[in-house]
Image (cartoon, rainbow, N blue to C red):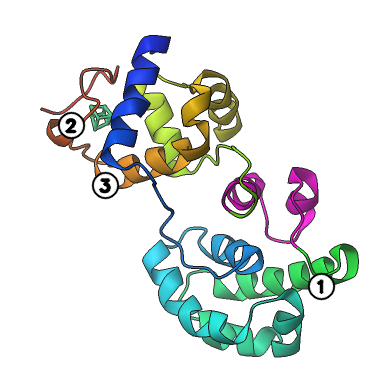
Amino acid sequence: MAMNKADRTEFFRRLEEDNPEPKGELDYTNPYTLLVAVALSAQATDIGVNKATKALFEVVSTPQDMLDMGESKLKDYIKTIGLFNSKAKNVIKAAHMLVEEHGGIVPNDQDALERLAGVGRKTANVVRSMAWGVPTIAVDTHVFRMGNRTGMATGKTTLEVEKKLLKVIPKQYLFHAHHWLILHGRYICKARKPECSKCKVYDLCKYKAKTV
Ligand code: SF4
């Protein structure tokens, strides 16, 4: 069953009440290091990425710094992160593209971002939202699950869920919505066993298998 407009508004009002200024959990120092951190976080935990990037971002803050460092030194910094070999290759390729095609600046354009090596739709959405303040919805595994379980935005693909969420989330909540959904999905509406008894939006959620 789909969630109605009044319930969607109340859903986000409660999440806002709980956490008025939600933040992502990845550490970064500027739009470029945000892009690198998000790209490194695919199939890895934010905590694991932060551990590796703490030292990396002390010496790298621009795409040119990354090129000066080179792929093999970069691998030393990120070798604790899953898939680090292919991620290092993509980070270096993307740094080349940023220097050659964008003057070393991270673009604020979905297509231009998605053309960078290793950058998919989700990463581009996160960067546009967090670096440039564009109200996008980056659909990761948590947002996808939340959209489907609650009945707010059901869909078989992340793109379908993204498009529906953009349409149905009340405008005043759109900018922070993806963080609220990620955090709620990560800590309460967990994949294996959602903690429905602790959930602030229990009565609004349409999930048939709610746990009590
Ligand atoms: S009630 Fe349960 S399934 Fe619904 S959003 Fe809350 S934790 Fe998730």
Q: Which residue is mark 1?
A: 96
Q: Is residue 166 above or below residue 44?
A: above
**Residue 177 image-quadrant placement:** top left
Secondary structure at numbered mark 1: helix
Residue labelled with disc 3: 187
Q: Is residue 67 left or right of residue 29?
A: right
The amino acid type, in three-letter code, at marker 2 is: Cys
Q: Position of residue 89 (x, y in %)?
A: 69, 74
**First in sequence: mark 3 or mark 1?**
1
How crowded pointer 1 is (Cα within 10 Å; few <14, some 14-19, many 20+) is rated as some
Q: Nearer the viewer, residue 130 or 41?
A: 130
Confirm or reject: label 1 Cβ below 8 Å from ligand 1: no
Q: Which residues are magenta?
A: 106-130
Taking the image as shown, residue 66 lies to the left or right of residue 81, namely right
Q: What is the magenta segment's predominant secondary structure? A: helix
* Amino acid type at mark 3: Tyr
